[in-house]
Image (cartoon, rainbow, N blue to C red):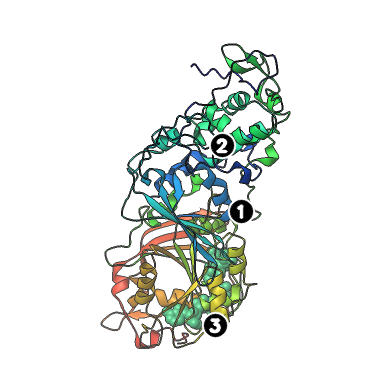
Amino acid sequence: MADDGSPSQGEGPSGSGLGPMNMNLPSTDSGEGNPESEGQDQLPLPTRTLRDLLNPPRDLARMRQRLFEVKDKIELQVDEFERYWPYIDNVWVRQHKAGTDKSGRVITDYYACRLQRPTYTPKSDTPRRDGQPTRKKQIREGGTCQMRLKTIRYEGGYSGYTIVKVGDETQHTHDLEHIDKIKRTSVLMEIARSEVMKGYMPASVFTVMNEDMEKLIAAGGRYLNRNDVRNASQHWRQNHREELRVHEGYKYDHGNGIVRHDGATQTTQLNGDTQMVDPALTNIPPLPPGTLRFPESGRAFLEPYLPPTEPAVDESGFPHVTLTYATSMDSSLTLAPGMQTILSGPETKAMTHYLRSKHDAIVIGVGTAAADDPALNCRLEGVGGFGGLGWEGQPRPVIIDPGARWMITPQSRVLQTVAAGKGRGPWVIMAPGFAMDPMRLELLKYYGGKYLGLTDFDKKWRLRWEAILKALAAEGIKSVMIEGGGMVINDLLQPENAGFINSVIVTVAPTYLGKGGVGVSPAPVHDHTGRPQPAVKFQNVKWQPLGEDVVMCGKLQKQAIMAQPTASGVNSQFEG
Ligand SMILES: NC(=O)C1=CN([C@@H]2O[C@H](COP(=O)(O)OP(=O)(O)OC[C@H]3O[C@@H](n4cnc5c(N)ncnc54)[C@H](O)[C@@H]3O)[C@@H](O)[C@H]2O)C=CC1
Ligand SMILES: Nc1nc(O)c(N)c(N[C@@H]2O[C@H](COP(=O)(O)O)[C@@H](O)[C@H]2O)n1
């Protein structure tokens, strides 16, 4: 029978003479596991409406594809997960009850591809319990795809979802469209149900849902048909026998089903009962205050100094290291020790945040953590928490604090930033000999951070950079931005450490801070004859004015790296 969308018995105005609804048409799935065909009494009232179709979550088609493929780990904030997952739940079938860890704050769920379930062949001769004629059911394809994933939900100071593939399979045996063909998402079914529950005929709902075909396809609805709408609302309609109507501005047109009135626009038609597009109610959250912009056109000069785009821990096993800070004309980082001084202008500040977005981690010494109470996140437009998804582009803050000096509290900006979903939990590099009190340890964990214990000291009782960088690489960090402060920078610029630096990007601000601040001046070096040598020289240098500042980018020259430090020249400010 040609399904032209004719309203069927029970759904059309009485006496309209419209054709009977075919209740026996096969559904798109066997119905097994389909919330619309099981226990509709238990279904909560639908919260999705047509508005969700017309104002879809950002980048819906791309996100569906990502959540289908799960090529890499996907991190989503709780509201983002709740927004996107119902658009992909036609693919993923939950395997067993969620598991919770000891703390009760980490909940893991396992899912398998819909096509992992065995093929289902209905027994056509089994009569229904209510004596009704047997329903025509389709054989449900299965047993062909072994893709599986798990979702890990974190609750606490840090809350969000991590989605990762599990098992040996690396990809589905089919594409996403194949699943869209055989099963509808819960969002689509809920939208259909909510519209019928408002008193609209399924055929009218179907027409209206198809008004913006591009959006319907992005939502996985390419194969949505009238029977889906009927199935979605079937139970409700059994208990609500009232007449259903067509949407305002639509009419039944013989041979064409439900169509728009000539001249009516979609918005005027849908503004009535279906509470259509209100720009204030879009699914795209506004950017938070403090969001920074660094224009695309001004980024090219940094390109040669950035970590490789296909980041890989190089053969030596070390991450890409960028040393970057802001200094005055007299090479000072700050007016006085233990004090924060703003040196970067708005343009170079935005550049720093662009650099942060390009690195997996930001490293600072505990002196800086204590003095600045920094947020250590990236506030560039487009990264997670600032218009982007999850924590995309958010670096991991790392604090070198072997002596457990950092007095972290829930009020610390870095933790407040985590709680606001705008940054990652900090990692603290400690020497296990210095016991940190359990409360602070617990606090870090609660906010998604952790401690890394290192014992590899040099003869001055400093942790070796080799060990620090290797430990970070072992944690999956492929690029590190080292921001300061003075002790960290001076130490890193010493010949025995300078070889770890891949690029230097320094902002020079047009000011003299005067004596008494924290200076950048690495220990002097001498050649083998004892002649003084420059401590560090650069190559591939670029000077770029940016606002009132100038940015120096460079790579370290090899001979500087090879020079010998004088015994007396070793930075003596370090504590153990
Ligand atoms: N203008 C800028 O771009 C920046 C300015 N700053 C400023 O710098 C000042 C802080 O600098 P500093 O006092 O020099 O402190 P710092 O931030 O360099 O921290 C030094 C401390 O970190 C630990 N540490 C670092 N590396 C270590 C290693 N390899 N082994 C063992 N322990 C290690 C030690 O406890 C050491 O006392 C602050 O006033 C801050 O505002 C900090 C970063 C950037
Ligand atoms: N690039 C740059 N310019 C300045 O003028 C600075 N004072 C700093 N300081 C560094 O940035 C951290 C502050 O970060 P948040 O804004 O709180 O995220 C501070 O701790 C230093 O590492 N940097």
> What kind of residue is marked 3?
Pro
Q: Could you tell which of marks 3 and 1 lies nearer the N-terminus?
A: 1
User: Label 3 vs label 2: CA separation?
Assistant: 49 Å
> What kind of residue is marked 1?
Thr
* Residue on which the image places disc 2: 189
Q: Nearer the viewer, residue 371 or 288?
A: 288
Where is residue 246 shown, x and y percent of the image?
67, 22
Q: Secondary structure at mark 3?
A: helix
Residue drawn at x 64%, y 15% as measured from the top left: 252
In the image, residue 505 sits, relative to residue 43, either above or below, namely: below
* Residue on which the image places disc 3: 438
Local packing at callout 1 (Cα closer than 10 Å; few below 14, some 14-19, many 20+) is some
Residue drawn at x 49%, y 85% as measured from the top left: 403
Is the distance from the Cβ of mark 1 to the nearest ligand 2 atom less than 8 Å?
A: no
Q: Nearer the viewer, residue 45 or 519?
A: 45
Where is residue 378 shown, x and y percent of the image?
54, 59
In the image, residue 326 sits, relative to residue 235, either above or below, namely: below
In the rendered image, is residue 518 in sight? no
Q: Could you tell which of marks 3 and 2 lies nearer the N-terminus?
A: 2
In the image, residue 8 sits, relative to residue 209, either above or below, namely: above
Label ID, residue 480: none
Q: Secondary structure at mark 2?
A: helix
Q: Secondary structure at mark 1?
A: loop
In the rendered image, is residue 471 in sight? yes
> What kind of residue is marked 2?
Met
* Residue on which the image places disc 1: 291
Foreground label between 2 and 1: 2
Q: Are marks 3 and 1 in contact (CB under 8 Å)?
A: no
In the image, residue 117 sits, relative to residue 525, either above or below, namely: above
Local packing at callout 3 (Cα closer than 10 Å; few below 14, some 14-19, many 20+) is few
Looking at this view, name the residue that lies furthest to the top: 254
